[in-house]
Image (cartoon, rainbow, N blue to C red):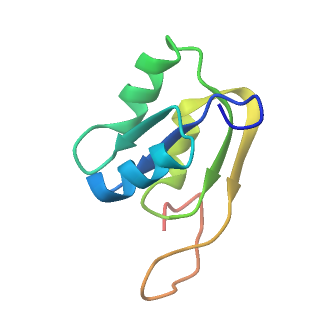
């Protein structure tokens, strides 16, 4: 736990997952290997999470909403899209 929160992290590699665990994440999902929505539902027993801090953007933002409890927060910190195209949640781009 980090400051009382149960932290579920997602990342693309085992090396990053190990680092996240070392920094205090309770669970880390390697989203290149597993469907993170299914894993979050498994971990939370389908209750969902209170907040998402998304540092990836287009690849995870829309899907991340499926992990949230009703009326909770999905915070987009930045977009890591190499082409830096505008992001539109409605269009999924």
Q: Position of residue 77 (x, y in %)?
A: 67, 65
Image position, residue 55 (x, y; %): 57, 63
Residue at left offset 38%, top offset 28%: 39
- Residue farthest to the top? 45
For the question of whether residue 62 can be seen, the reply is: yes
- The outermost residue toward the front is 22
Residue at (41%, 17%) from the top-left corner?
A: 42
Residue 31 picture location, percent across and down: 33, 47
Q: Is residue 11 left or right of residue 2?
A: left
Residue 19 in the image, given as x and y percentages of width and height:
43, 54
At horizontal 44% and vertical 47% (from top left) the residue drawn is 10
Instruction: From the viewer's side, name the closer residue of 3 and 33.
Output: 3
Q: Is 82 placed above or below 2 here? A: below
Drawn side of residue 34 relative to residue 64, left or right? left
Q: In front here: 27 or 88?
A: 27
Q: Nearer the viewer, residue 56 or 71?
A: 56
Q: Where, quadrant-wise, is the N terminus in this rendering?
A: top right
Residue 63 makes an appearance in the image: no
Query: Quick one: which residue is furthest to the left in this view?
Result: 33
Residue at the far bottom in the pictured view: 83
Taking the spot 58% from the left edge, 72% from the top edge, the residue there is 87
81 vs 45: above or below: below
Residue placed most toward the observer, 37 or 27 = 27
């Amino acid at each position: 736990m980090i400051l009382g929160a149960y932290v579920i992290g997602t990342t693309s590699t085992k090396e990053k997952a190990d680092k996240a665990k070392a920094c205090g994440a309770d669970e880390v999902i390697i989203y290149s290997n597993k469907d993170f929505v299914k894993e979050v539902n498994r971990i939370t027993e389908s209750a969902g999470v209170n907040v998402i801090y998304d540092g990836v953007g287009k690849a995870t933002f829309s899907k991340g909403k499926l992990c949230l409890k009703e009326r909770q927060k999905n915070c987009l910190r930045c977009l890591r899209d190499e082409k830096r195209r505008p992001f539109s949640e409605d269009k999924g781009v």
